[in-house]
Amino acid sequence: MNLFKKIVSLGKSLFSEPKKNGKPRKNGDAQRRGKKGRPSENASNSKRRQREEQPSENRQSRGRGNARGRGDRSKRSGEIDVQAVAAKPRAPKPVPALPDSAELFAALPEFASLGLSPAVLAAVKDMGYSAPTPIQSKAIPIVLSGADVIGTAQTGTGKTAAFSLPIIDMLGRPQFEPRVLVLSPTRELASQTAEAFGNFSKYSPIETLLVQGGVSMERQIAALKSGVDVVVATPGRLLDLNRQRAISLKKIKWLVLDEVDRMFDMGFIEDVSNIIRYCPKERQTLFFSATMPDAVMRLSKWALSDPQRLDTGIVQNSPADTIEHFVYPVDGIQKYDLLIEYLKSITFDSLIVFTRTRIDADRIGEWLIGHDYKVSILHSDRTQRERDKALSDFKERKTNILVATDIASRGLDINDVQYVINYNVPEHAEDYVHRIGRTGRANKDGTAITLYSSDETMFLRRIEDFINAKIERRKLEGFPYRNEPILVEETKKHRKRNR
Ligand code: AMP
């Protein structure tokens, strides 16, 4: 098959994925509310949930079709005159003096043995790391060897350093054009990754730029004009900049696709495929995904060349041993009251409540504030400033409850979250593992509970199948249940035996 045919057939197979997010959004907010304005407990369909988390810049980009469609859009108003954006010539980045190499090697023998240079080791030491995590031990030498990598690493395993340390090592002197591109599904993950690149390149002269929607484009254009080495981006904004010729991807030598399954879920795959096409074929590609469904595998086959597989030894579909998790059956109408009573029954200073919809997140967040809890609210309809503030307030413990949609279920590195409460049973079984994985991190104990009403039975079954375990049902003592919660559900086998 010639190259053209191959690309066309690959494009067809990629784009023949069900368009999860392609339909116009219905104004169904009113339907989603229950009596007295409480969030409805009806299980909504998965498409709606997927649309929920589209960051606004990417919602715009969906349905634009192919690259030509995007080109047509350049005549729209609101475009920026890239030429007119003023940019200062980039001053050399001030880099601290390197500590003695022998001391660094002695302090970090395991990191040193992976082949990292003193400039990177010094930054690792400043981060307070003493030894590499398993994924770092495996990935760093492979990445340094120049091979493509396909990894099923989960967040929380030290994945960011596993790819950023060797890349920084190989970057060398700055060249004032992006040579590294990291694509992240959410702004929060992108911002976390850009911060990690900044920290790990403390002793290296390279500059990192975060390219995300929801914030000024002029500043990003000015920074690109001044010259950056690493771009960490969400797909929508990156394509907008590319379309306006504010960024060139022609010099990309390292392409990192992070949380690829999540990008699929969020409907970005067409954008991601186009971005890959804009990058040179001669590049090193690192591909990370928590799960590897068929569509993700297909993309990896197309985007990677002779990749090395990375297995972090983690069973992907089981929650960490440090998390105890329970299901609290309750009538949908009483969920909110049960949530409040549960919160009263525990002491905590860091707790996340996950909701299915943005409107539920706002509503529950506001009610909790009404109950004198200190609450941050995080979802994709909030402005970038609000999202940043919500996260920083929660991380700095100015608030002790974060009410969030699934935008916070993956990747976010928030320390010491003691409790996770699923206000709804997640529709996607993997989301359950990701959500409850926000607690019980770094060998700390954590508790996760899921409020479950009978119309969510199908989702709960799917989760139990996925993790291959029955989740213990619990009852909150002293709570005035309208109907006695069912703690032991009859299974078919059970019924047969008792006949
Ligand atoms: P990640 O999986 O990349 O989101 O990393 C999760 C957390 O682990 C972050 O807070 C990192 O700073 C931290 N971390 C990464 N590598 C190490 C290491 N080798 N030693 C200690 N902490 C680490």
Image: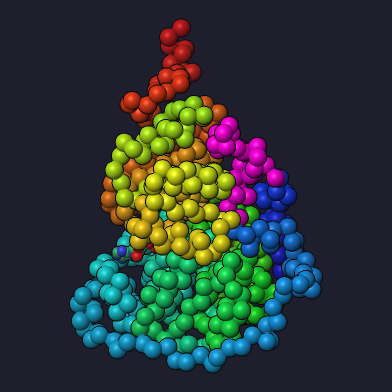
Q: Is residue 414 visible?
A: no
* Residue at horizontal 38 percent and vertical 68 percent from the top: 161
- Vertical comparison of 254 with 437: above or below: below
Point 32% across, 77% down: residue: 123
Residue 194 shown left or right of residue 80 in the figure: left
Question: Is 241 left, or right, of 180 in this rendering?
Answer: right
Ligand 1 quadrant in view: bottom left
Count of all numbered marks drawn on residues in the image: 0
Q: Is residue 155 above or below residue 161?
A: above
> Which residue occupies the foreground of this view, 254 or 236?
236
Q: Position of residue 248 (x, y in %)?
A: 63, 80
The magenta-colored residue range is 27-54
Image location of residue 414, percent across then percent down: 37, 57
Identify which residue, 354 or 65, lies in the foreground: 354
Q: Quadrant of residue 235?
A: bottom right
Assess whether residue 159 is covered by the magenta stretch. Answer: no
